[in-house]
Image (tube, rainbow, N blue to C red):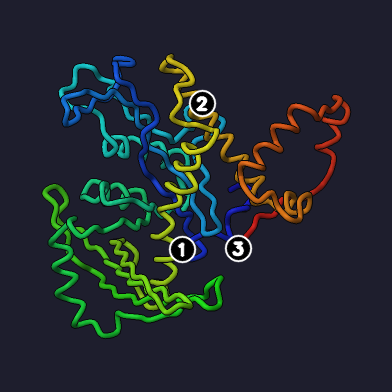
Amino acid sequence: MRKKALQRYRLLSLYYTVAIDGTGVLTFRERHCPHCLTKTLRNSETLYYHPVLEAKVVTPNGFALSLTPALRAGASVTEFVENADLLQDKQDCELKAFYRLSKRLKARFPRLPLCLLLDGLFAGGPTFKICEDHDWKYLIVLQEGDLLNLHRSFAAVTPHLPHARQHICLPSSNAQQKVEQDYLWANGLDYLDTKEPHHRLGVLECQETSTAPSGSSSHARHKWFTNFTLTAHNVERLANQGGRLRWRIENEGFNVQKNSELNMEHAYSQDPVARKVFYLLLQLACLFFQIMQKSNLLAQAFPDRLRTAKNQAKRILEVWHNLSLSSDEFLQLEQGNFQIRFDTS
C-alpha cells in the first residue's frame, strides 16, 4: 500500500475492498485445549474446533491478500475465535470476533478508505454503527430470508422508481457467450434496530443471464445492501468490482489454503500459541506466492507460464533444494533496480 501497488484495483478509484469471513482451521474428536469451541452433532457426538476470522484485500484480478502478516507486534488483524474467558456461559463466535477485529483494523489502518464485503451473518445494527463510526463503506449480501422488512420495503418502492434500473451487456472472454445484467436499486430504506433505530440503507439487485453458443442460458440473482448512494453511474462497478468479489476470500483464499499442500487444516502443533504462529506463517507464504504468481517477472522467466499453482510451488521448492547463492551474490541482489508489475486481466 505504501508503494501504491494496489491503487489500480480500488473500488470507484478510492476504496480498498476488504472481505471479512470466518473459516474452520482445526477440528478434533476430543478436547484439544480449554479454549476449544464445541458443537454437538445429531448423533450426540461432540466436536471440538478452532475457527478464525480473517480480513483479506480482494481484487478483480484474483488477489486475496491477507492483512494479517503485518510484521509488527500487535499489528495482526486476524481474530482467532476461541473461548478465552472460561467463566462465560456463551461461546465465542464470528460476530463477537468481528467486533474485536474491527477495532484493530481501524487502529492499524486509521485513514485507509475501506469498503467491507460481508455475508449476511454480519447484517445488523452493531455492524452498521461500527462502519459509520469508522467511516467505512460496506456491501453486505442480502439473502432471501434475512431482514424481511428490508425486502418488503425494496419490493414496495422499486415499481415507483423507473429511473433506478439499468440493463448492460458485459464483455466476455468467450466472444460467442453473451452475458447480460439487469440492475434495480433503491436508496434511503429504513432499517429498524432496537439500539440504533435510524439506519438508512441502499439495496442493490443484479439479475444476470449468461447465454452459451448452444443457446442454453443460466440465471443468477445477487442482492446487497449498502451505505453507498446508488446511482446509474456506479451500480455496475459496485456489483462487479465490489459485492461479487467477496467470494474471492473463499475461492482464492480459504479453498486454496485448505485443498492444496499448504494443508491449513492440519494440526502442525498441539501448542495453542504455536498453532497460531503456523497459521500466520501460512498467510505470509500465501501473500508471497500470489505476488510471484501475478508478477510480470514470472511471465518473463516462463512465457508459457507454469499452468498450475502446484507446478509453481514445485519449482520454488526445487530452487530451495538446488540453488545456492554466496553471501556476496545475495547482497548484490538489492543493488539492482527493477519493478514488479501485477497482472491486471
Amino acid carrying label 2: it is: Ala
The circle on residue 73 is 2
**Mark 2, residues whose alpha carbon is within 10 Å: few (<14), some, or many (≥20)?**
few
Position above or below: 77 against 143 = above
Of the residues under marks 1 and 2, which one precedes in the sequence? 2
**Mark 3, residues whose alpha carbon is within 10 Å: few (<14), some, or many (≥20)?**
few
Distance in Å between CA atoms under marks 3 and 1: 13 Å
Of the residues under marks 3 and 2, which one precedes in the sequence? 2
Estimate the x, y position of residue 326 in percent, counting from the top left. 86, 25
Q: Are marks 3 and 1 in contact (CB under 8 Å)?
A: no
Of the residues under marks 3 and 1, which one precedes in the sequence? 1
Distance in Å between CA atoms under marks 3 and 2: 35 Å
Horizontal arrangement in the rendering, residue 263 relative to residue 152 (left or right): right
Occupied quadrant, residue 46: top left
Q: Residue 101 versus residue 181: which sits nearer the camera?
A: 181
Q: Which residue is mark 3?
A: 345
Instruction: Please name which of the two marks, 3 or 2, marks the residue nearer to the observer.
Output: 3
Q: Which residue is mark 1?
A: 241
- Label 2, secondary structure: give it: loop
Q: Residue at x 55, y 33 (%)?
A: 261
